Image: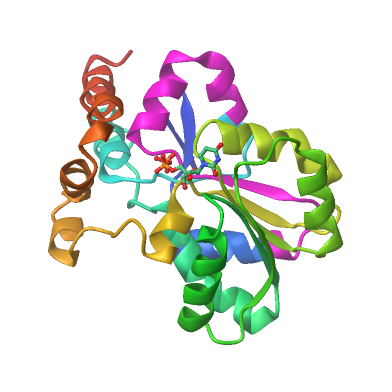
Amino acid sequence: MKQNVLGLQFDNVTMQEAIRCGEQFLEGDKPAVVVTPNAEIAYDAAQDPTFCELLNGADLILPDGAGVVLAAKLRKTPLKEKVAGIDFATNLLPVFARRGTRLYLLGSKPGVAEQAAQKMCQLAPGLVICGTADGYFQQEAPVIDAINAAKAEALFVCLGAPKQEKFMFAHRPELQTVRLMAGLGGSLDGFAGNVKRAPKWMIRMQLEWLYRLCKQPKRLGRMMRLPKYLIKAVRGQ
Ligand code: UDP
């Protein structure tokens, strides 16, 4: 079931249900797109109808962060739970390993995707990573060719928003073997260990944003979109 939160049509699913959707996509016959807007991205979407429409074209829209879940509650269109992109990706890894799904990692600075691949294989033994590429390419066509040549079935696109969403929708028709692709922002940095996640107690207390802010103070400007998003949710526009 969909839940409209300030224009974005979030899927009202638990993590387990999201993973089941992901598995269904793998059995489909076209590349499905998964997007994971956090409050900052959702705020941008609320300001920009074109971006909002682009995101709403996804097959699965997951609420990445406590801010979106809170906004949904304030709008009286509650969502079951936060389904963070990196957690969604982590939970998919054993599914891929069990099924033999070929996973391609795209994004982040040179070397990061390879480091992330190593960590992912430790998390899910038997995982098949069929290729990696950094996210600082000049031309997109060779990237698509490489993904097709690797016969990737799952693709993690980690270029930051809105670049990754534009990339996925623009190239969906050219991807020959991909059945599931997900825009996951800085997740490869997370897997590689370059950007540490908050301690478990902070995640539990919905304070991951505070941890990120302390670690990367230059995020303050963009993080100001979180309170603006919540104010919008209270006002309803
Ligand atoms: N990135 C990239 N290519 C670009 C711009 C950014 O691969 O042209 C990567 C960047 O290295 C980082 C990720 O995209 O790994 C964006 O991370 P950020 O935490 O800013 O994204 P968010 O998840 O907040 O959208």
Q: How many marks?
A: 0
Q: Where residue 24 sits in the image (x, y, percent)?
A: 67, 63
The residue sitting at 84% across, 50% down in the picture is 145
Q: Is residue 34 above or below residue 200?
A: above
Residue 87, picture quadrant: bottom left
Q: Is residue 65 above or below residue 123?
A: above
- Seen from the viewer's position, the closer of residues 199 and 37 is 199
The range drawn in magenta is: 25-54
Q: Where residue 230 sits in the image (x, y, percent)?
A: 23, 26
- Seen from the viewer's position, the closer of residues 229 and 235 is 229
- Seen from the viewer's position, the closer of residues 200 and 212 is 212
- Seen from the viewer's position, the closer of residues 140 and 20 is 140
Residue 167, picture quadrant: top right
Residue 32 highlighted magenta (yes or no): yes
Q: Where residue 74 sits in the image (x, y, percent)?
A: 23, 30
Residue 191 highlighted magenta (yes or no): no
In the rendered structure, the answer to whether residue 158 lies left or right of residue 101 reads left
Residue 94, picture quadrant: bottom right
**Quarter occupied by the C terminus:** top left
Q: Is residue 157 above or below residue 234?
A: below
Whether residue 237 appears in this view of the structure is yes
In the rendered structure, the answer to whether residue 213 lies left or right of residue 188 reads left
